[in-house]
Amino acid sequence: PPLDRIHLSFFPALALAGLISALFGLIIGVPTLRLKGDYLAIATLGFSEIIRVVFTNIVTITNGALGLKNIPEHTTLLWSCGWMIFTIFFIQRLVNSSYGRAMKGIRDNEVAAEAMGVNLFTHKILAFVVGAFFAGVGGGLLANLITTIDPKTFTPVLTYQVLMIIVVGGLGSISGTVVSAGIFAVLMEYLRPLDNLIPGLRMVFFSVLLM
């Protein structure tokens, strides 16, 4: 309480999940995005672990390690596919906009982009916030699909899986990432018996694939 007495319909709840995640992305992005390269990666991974530990310990709000149970099952194939199509459409439009071209310039050469008048910090924050928003909505869809959510779901292994999808699909390639994500999701299910033989064997296979 009082969160258990707050009820929203599905779509506003998803939008709120995205906005709250975007806010967290902004809060985390402001101090960390002044870093570069490996330092930025380490800082963001550190923040993700801090948030996971905090959520595990604020039992009165999140129910701690037990997580939230009995979440209504609203996510359907239509919702998932619809959101995927919207995400691809939005990101494609963003990439082809002036903001997207500036982001690609920053990706290729930060010094050259800054010399051309691109505000590095603003565009990095924009990318961070947009990414956090879509991650928040994705989390809402996940919670309403499996009807339970807990901090143990979001370990560093999940981060590595997402990075694996991006690297295998090709950095900067939207179509490649979509195909890679589909293949990865299918393989994750079909290779599940490997973990029954030796715990963690499935991730060893993916690590070899990534190399």
Image (cartoon, grey):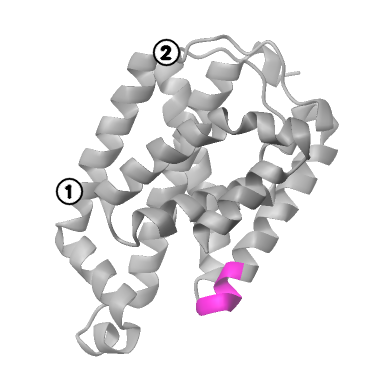
- The magenta stretch is 35-41
Q: Amino acid at mark 2?
A: Thr
Q: Is residue 128 left or right of residue 44?
A: left
In the image, is residue 54 part of the stretch drawn in magenta? no
In the foreground, 88 or 176: 176
Which secondary structure, mark 1?
Answer: helix
Image point 72% across, 35% down: which residue? 195
Q: Amino acid at mark 1?
A: Arg
Q: Residue furthest front?
A: 197
Q: Which residue is mark 2?
A: 76
For the residues labelled 1 and 2, the Cα–Cα distance comes to 26 Å
Query: Where 33 sits versus 5, above or below?
Result: below
Image point 56% across, 72% down: which residue? 40
**Residue 74, position as x, y percentages in the image:** 48, 11
Tell me whether the residue at label 1 lies in contact with that at label 2, contact meaning CB atoms closer than 8 angstroms.
Answer: no
Q: Is residue 136 left or right of residue 152?
A: left
In the rendered image, which quarter contains the N terminus? Answer: top right
State the predominant SS element of the stretch in magenta: helix
Query: Where 13 sits versus 31, above or below?
Result: above
What numbered label is drawn on residue 93?
1
